[in-house]
Image (spheres, grey):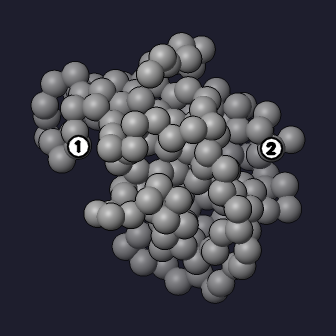
Amino acid sequence: MKIDNSFPVVFWGKDKSTKSQFYPCEAIPDFSLVTSCMVCVVHENKILLAKPPRGWGLPGGRMELGETPEDCARREVYEETSVELNSLKLIGAWHIEKLFHSKYNGRYPDRAYQLLFLADVKRIDDFVASHESSAREFVEFDKVQDYHHDFANFAEIMTYIKSCVL
């Protein structure tokens, strides 16, 4: 698959052992390489953020055995935020490549895709903090940088998300 190189390459892990690059897409890349999903949930012109142990960010996580990406997205959003989703639309993916094996990427495959969906809200249930997430908040687009745990590496993707929504 040809990758759109307009987004910067980002290196993950304290040892920078994993290379990641985001690109816009509307079709799921190689399904066998999809490992996780993130979701930009928009409600009343605000974005839903969750606060898992790594810090504030879009809700999402790893796919479970036999799960579709859409099922993963819905499950992860509900587990982390107690928000049930209506429609889902794929708007992008991160192409992830292990540069070398390390303690930071040991459980991940050498190549993978992490999908980014756009969604709207069906229902908001009472939030109960758990190991998945200690908080949830709907944040105005222009305030995400005040919350996101890694906004420096997320700013261009946030601009792209805004272009998909507004």
* Residue lying at 60% horizontally and 32% vertically, measured from the top left: 25
Instruction: State the residue lying farthest toward the top.
Output: 5
Locate the N terminus by quadrant: top left
Numbered label tally: 2
Q: Is residue 158 above or below residue 128?
A: above
Residue 155: image location, x then y, percent: 63, 31
Left or right of residue 96: residue 159: right
One can see residue 139 in this view: no
- State how far apart marks 1 and 2 are (Cα): 31 Å
Is disc 1 placed on a helix, strand or loop? Answer: loop
* Residue lying at 86% horizontally and 41% vertically, measured from the top left: 166
Q: Nearer the viewer, residue 7 or 117?
A: 117
Amino acid type, mark 2: Val
Residue 151: image location, x then y, percent: 57, 36
| Labels 1 and 2: the sequence-earlier one | 1
The residue where tag 1 is placed is 108
Residue 152: image location, x then y, percent: 55, 29
One can see residue 63 in this view: yes
Amino acid type, mark 1: Tyr
Is disc 2 placed on a helix, strand or loop? Answer: helix
The label on residue 165 is 2
- Image-quadrant location for residue 124: bottom right
Q: Are marks 1 and 2 in contact (CB under 8 Å)?
A: no
- Image-quadrant location for residue 162: top right
Left or right of residue 59: residue 11: left
Q: Is residue 157 above or below residue 143?
A: above
* Residue lying at 34% horizontally and 24% vertically, measured from the top left: 19
Residue 111: image location, x then y, percent: 28, 31
- Image-quadrant location for residue 161: top right
* Residue lying at 60% horizontally and 68% vertically, measured from the top left: 136
